[in-house]
Image (spheres, coloured by chain):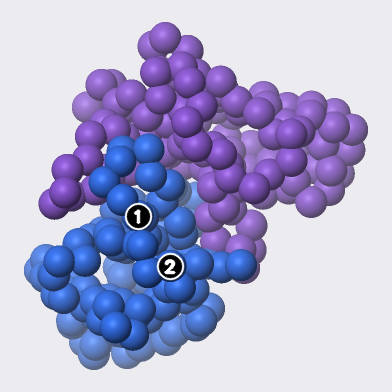
Chain colours: A purple, B blue
């Protein structure tokens, strides 16, 4: 079974531009979450999509948005880029099934390294 | 406000010895805890997890211990191997809803020296 794929892998943009990142989840996975990783900050949760609906959102400004398509593929958009947006953006997919004995394991893609100049 | 804290940004351990990675949390509602491992240029991969109804979970060389009263968990790797050199993230979630957010710590870089 193919893993989570993210495109592009690397991206260089300038301040003020906008960017769209793409994520294809593992086949059959209905939930897609996005994270931002910066040095020393760990993985900061951006948002989660399930069945084309955003059902969880982290503490990021409105410049960060996303969507999910009917095939579960997801895109993340960042508008008016700032230098501080330079980071590794990770996408994770999961089955979105959780019982009292187990949580919903997330499977991560390799990430998109965004550099804002 | 970091709900999941990994206070050691790095750790160096000799090959064959035990590696102990620590994690503290503040939210008493967390009931499920996970460890992820990340190599450079790759996404994190799930390693091991533990439910709050247990205090220990073992999988091969990896054991996770949970101390609910201290809001502390640790990951033990025995014996440590060169391939274990990576960044380890501790994570936690609350509630049984599949919509629960998973909160990650800032990571600990483990280096296994020969």
Q: Residue B114: image x %, image y %?
A: 33, 86
Count residues near mark 1 (Cα–Cα under 10 Å), then give few for <14, some for 14-19, many for 20+. some
Q: Earlier in the sequence, mark 1 or mark 2?
A: 2
Q: Secondary structure at mark 1?
A: strand
Q: Is residue A39 above or below residue A87?
A: below
Image quarter where the N terminus of chain A lies is top left
The residue shown at (24%, 87%) is: B18
Q: Residue B111: image x %, image y %?
A: 41, 78
The residue shown at (35%, 55%) is: B94
Q: Is label 1 in contact with label 2 (beta carbons under 8 Å)?
A: yes
State the mark number for residue B94. Answer: 1
* Residue A76 located left or right of residue B19: right
Q: Residue A70: image x %, image y %?
A: 42, 9
Q: Is residue B104 above or below residue B69?
A: above
The residue shown at (23%, 34%) is: A97
* Residue A60 located left or right of residue B39: right
Q: Secondary structure at mark 2?
A: loop
State the mark number for residue B27. Answer: 2
> In which quarter of the view is residue A96 placed?
top left
Residue furthest to the right in view is A16
* Residue B53 located left or right of residue B31: left
Q: Is residue B113 visible?
A: no
State the mark number for residue A30. Answer: none
Badge 2: chain ID: B
Badge 1: chain ID: B
The residue shown at (73%, 48%) is: A86
Q: Is residue A72 above or below residue B35?
A: above
Q: Is A91 or B92 nearer to us in this picture?
A: B92
Count residues near mark 2 (Cα–Cα under 10 Å), then give few for <14, some for 14-19, many for 20+. some
Spatial distance from mark 1 to mark 2, Cα to Cα? 9 Å
Image quarter where the C terminus of chain A lies is top right
């Amino acid at each position: 079974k193919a893993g989570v794929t993210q495109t592009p892998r690397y991206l260089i943009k300038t301040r003020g531009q906008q960017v769209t990142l793409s994520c294809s989840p593992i086949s059959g996975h209905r939930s897609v979450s996005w994270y931002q990783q910066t040095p020393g900050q760990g993985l900061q949760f951006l948002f989660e999509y399930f069945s084309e609906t955003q059902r969880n959102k982290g503490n990021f400004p409105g410049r960060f948005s996303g969507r999910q398509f009917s095939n579960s593929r997801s895109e993340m958009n960042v508008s008016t880029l700032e230098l501080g947006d330079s980071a590794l953006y990770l996408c994770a997919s999961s089955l979105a099934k959780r019982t009292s004995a187990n949580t919903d394991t997330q499977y991560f893609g390799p990430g998109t390294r965004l550099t804002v100049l | 406000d970091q709900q999941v804290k990994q206070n050691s940004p790095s750790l160096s351990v000799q090959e064959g010895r035990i590696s102990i990675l620590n994690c503290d949390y503040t939210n008493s509602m967390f009931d499920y805890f996970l460890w992820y491992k990340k190599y450079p240029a790759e996404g994190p991969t799930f390693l091991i997890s533990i439910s709050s109804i247990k205090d220990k979970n073992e999988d091969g060389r990896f054991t996770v211990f949970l101390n609910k009263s201290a809001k502390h968990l640790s990951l033990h790797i025995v014996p440590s191997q060169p391939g274990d050199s990576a960044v380890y993230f501790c994570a936690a979630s609350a509630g049984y809803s599949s919509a629960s957010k998973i909160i990650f710590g800032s990571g600990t870089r483990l280096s296994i020296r020969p």
